Each structure stands twice: as C-alpha cells, then as structure tokens.
Amino acid sequence: MAGSDDVPVLADEDPVAVAVVRAIRTGDLATLRRLLAADPDLVHARIGVPDGRPGSAVSRTLLHVAADWPGHYPNGAATVAVLVAAGADVDARAVGAHTETPLHWAASSGDVEVLDALLDAGADIDAAGAVVGGGTPLDDATAFAQWRTAHRLVERGAHPTLWHAATLGLLDRLRADLARPHPPDPAEVSAALWGACHGGQQRAAGYLLDHGADLNWIPAWEPLTPLDAATRSGAVALADWLRARGARSAAGSTP
C-alpha cells in the first residue's frame, strides 16, 4: 500500500484490493472482518489510481465499492455497517472526473438497502458532487431513472427541486413551486416538462404545459425533445398524448 496523508492507496489488481472487493461484492462478512482486523488502515483505503485521462480509473473507498453499479450485492446493509463500525467515512468522495459520495453511487445503482444503510449511518442526503451537474444523490437517481432510490431519498428528507418534483410526479410540490411569489423562469419550467416526460409523468407534464412550458424544448445535455424523452422511457401513453398536442421529435418528425 502507498498513499498520501496516511491514506492507503491500492491498485485495482493489488491482491488485498482484489480480496476486499470480492468480499464486499459477495457479501462475505467474515472475510471482510478478517481483512479489516488484519490491517485496520484498510478501512480508509482508496482503490484505483486516476491518471487524469477521460475514462480512467476512479479512486474509490470501500463504501463506494459496496454501493457500486450494479448494486444489490448480498448483505449490502450489513457490509455498510461493518465498514462504518470499523471507521469508514460515510461521506468520503471519489477522486477522478467526479467527486461523488457512496450515497450518490447507491442512488445511481437503485440500491435502496445500501442507500438506507448509508443514511442511517449519517450520510449527507443532499451532498453535492453528482455525475449529473455536480448535484445531489437525487440528481443521479432521477437522471438514471432509478425511481425507487429517488422516491426513497425524498421520503428520507432530500430536498426536491422543480425538476425532481416534475420527474417524480410530486404534484403538490410542483404546484407549490409554481405558485411562489417569484415563480421559476420559463427555461426552468420547460426543463421540468422535459423531466416529467423522462419520468413518464403525464399529469405533471400537463400541469407544466398549462404554465407555459415549451412543448419542444431541447436541453443542453442531450438533443432530445420531451417527446423523445418520453419515447425513450417507454411512456407510450404519454408520448401519444404529447403528439396529440403537436409535440415533435428532435429529428423533426413525430415518431
């Protein structure tokens, strides 16, 4: 192991890294406890060494490994508990192109069990650093259509924006946001419409159209209209409803 500031750094192929990652991904708590007992500093280790190139490795903690895609590893909550009890930092950040916390990764993986365990251990529910615009775990969950973790984050106290409210169909929140003394600007309302279509939320989409959203608004992050977003999400009834109102595809047709 080598690292700075007394933080061990392990290459992905290091035998200790291979062993501890395998223990986490297989839910082998006995082996995980044995490895941590043999080297108490291991709980603080970072695995992977970013070299600055696009797509290069991300330096991650053991809690990140527990929350990593595709998630839902055996004994996920218990693994988090073992690592936290051994001294793992629940809000440690990945190092690389993005600085997500383990909670961001659990949200992106749709892993409610690990997400709850991290929150129970004190994880910051609104931590910045998401791969999506540097935002919160809720930004990752909604962007990657992980609806179970998205709704769970709201249940656990995450602060939804207009975008989140539209995407998740939180109509009471949506109405409250649009009724503020200083309502959102038109671009934000149109972005929320796009989010509602991404989330397959027809009632939210209708409400936003009634409040001036642009039916064919295209975001900066990808060249898709609300109709395209609904079609990609498999929201067939919503896509038909949008077409009936004159919605177009970014390709210039009404697919």
Image (spheres, grey):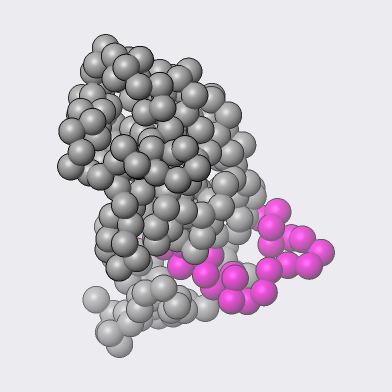
Question: Considering depth in this image, is 149 or 89 the residue closer to the camera?
Answer: 89
Q: Residue at x 44, y 39 (%)?
A: 7
Q: Is residue 234 left or right of residue 92?
A: left
Q: Is residue 7 left or right of residue 38?
A: right
Quarter of the image that includes the C terminus:
bottom left
Start-end of magenta stretch: 175-204
Residue 73 rendering spot, x and y as whole percentages: 26, 29
Residue 38 rendering spot, x and y as whole percentages: 32, 17
Residue 140 rendering spot, x and y as whole percentages: 44, 52
Question: Per the image, is 192 magenta?
Answer: yes
Q: Is residue 86 left or right of residue 26?
A: right
Q: Seen from this angle, which residue lies furthest bottom?
A: 252
Residue 87 rendering spot, x and y as whole percentages: 49, 24
Q: Is residue 96 visible?
A: yes
- Number of dots carrying numbers: 0
Question: Considering depth in this image, is 245 or 24 the residue closer to the camera?
Answer: 24
Question: Per the image, is 65 magenta?
Answer: no
Quarter of the image that includes the N terminus:
top left
Magenta stretch, main secondary structure class: helix
Q: Quadrant of residue 244?
A: bottom left
Q: Quadrant of residue 33?
A: top left
Q: Quadrant of residue 161?
A: bottom right
Q: Is residue 187 left or right of residue 241?
A: right
In the rendered image of this protein, does residue 98 appear above or below residue 108? Answer: below
Q: Residue at x 30, y 87 (%)?
A: 252
In the rendered image of this protein, does residue 211 appear above or below residue 41? Answer: below
Q: Residue at x 42, y 48 (%)?
A: 94
